[in-house]
Image (cartoon, rainbow, N blue to C red):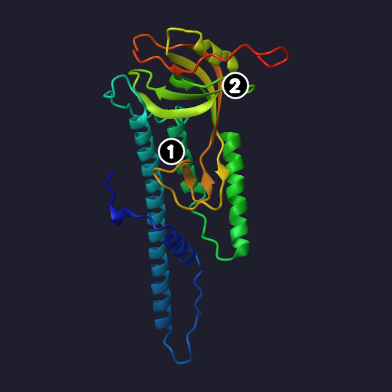
Amino acid sequence: MERNPSRRVRVPLAFSIAAMAWAPITLAQSGPPGQPEGLVEAQLASLQEQNRELRRQVEALQQELSDAYAKLAEAQRQIAALQAPTDDGSTPAAAAPHDPFASPAGLLAELRRRYAAEIAVLPEPEDDRGRQSRAREVDRWCREVSREVRARREWIVRFTEVGESRADGAPATAIVLDRATGAPIDGPVQSIVPRRFADRMRSGAPNSIWRAQVVFAAAPRVNAARKDSSVFEGVPLIGPGVEFAYDLEWEAFAPGPGGMSVPSPTVVPAPSAPKPGEPR
């Protein structure tokens, strides 16, 4: 992936400039004895123009930061799609829909947009009190997002692995597919599938593509120790101090749309029958 060093975003610089730009300008209305009044007014006008210029620079840096987060989210989506297994290894990945609830990659991009607009614009704290205030604001933002950012959707998915059933369900890995072409738009998505669905997938059903009714919700979590993001990170970073996570509930499954030809999912052998008294 090409990188343009001149496009690097220096967040501390943006916040430092922000602190300077919004600092009130005070100037004595009259200069030292004998100083012409016109000179004082000229100095005031010059300082006001400098203040306006600093504000313009801050707005430009904030926009650049927002654009950088959006580009990073898109790069991660493309990497996930390229790594997703396809029919013969040559099927091009479909573009991720703009709907943030269409896949984890879409949700990550939306949360990064909100973070850039609501958290990244806050002034950089200069003392312990300021850092504590910012930490409270970040924590409040995570709770608010977890409450508000959720929706019910129908996904087209292909399971590449279904693990052994446990009391809470079966660990599974799925690829989210484009409804029209069957090309992957995101994956692998790891989650817990209810036992009744996992058992059905092991039963030898001929359809390896499923229409899944899901409840998909953001669940960002605070990790103040993490400040920098990397394309190849394990847990993606929404922004400094906030990691990406989500809740995924599988409500129902049905055979997928016809005409999509993909390999059958890789499933492990069905577990042995439970002993009396054990959960089924």
User: In this rendering, would 83 be left or right of 277?
Assistant: left
Residue lying furthest bottom in this view?
34
Q: Quadrant of the N terminus?
A: top left
Which residue is more in the foreground, 35 or 262?
Answer: 262
Q: Where does the image place residue 58, in percent across and percent down from the top left?
A: 41, 59
Q: How many marks?
A: 2
Residue indicated by mark 2: 169
Name the residue rendered at 40%, 14% in the picture.
264
Name the residue rendered at 42%, 17% in the picture.
265
Amino acid at circle 2: Gly
Q: Where does the image place residue 12, in percent across and percent down from the top left?
A: 45, 61
Amino acid at circle 1: Ala
Dot 1: element: helix
Residue lying furthest right in this view?
277
Q: Earlier in the sequence, mark 1 or mark 2?
A: 1
Asked which quadrant contains residue 14, the reply is bottom left
Q: Residues within 10 Å of mark 2 (few under 14, many from 20)?
A: some
Residue 52 position (above or below residue 159): below
Q: Residues within 10 Å of mark 1 (few under 14, many from 20)?
A: many
Dot 2: element: loop
Asked which quadrant contains residue 169, the reply is top right
Residue indicated by mark 1: 109
Q: Where does the image place residue 114, in percent across and percent down from the top left?
A: 49, 43
Name the residue rendered at 45%, 92% in the picture.
34
* Mark 1 in CB contact with mark 2 (< 8 angstroms): no
Q: Quadrant of the C terminus?
A: top right
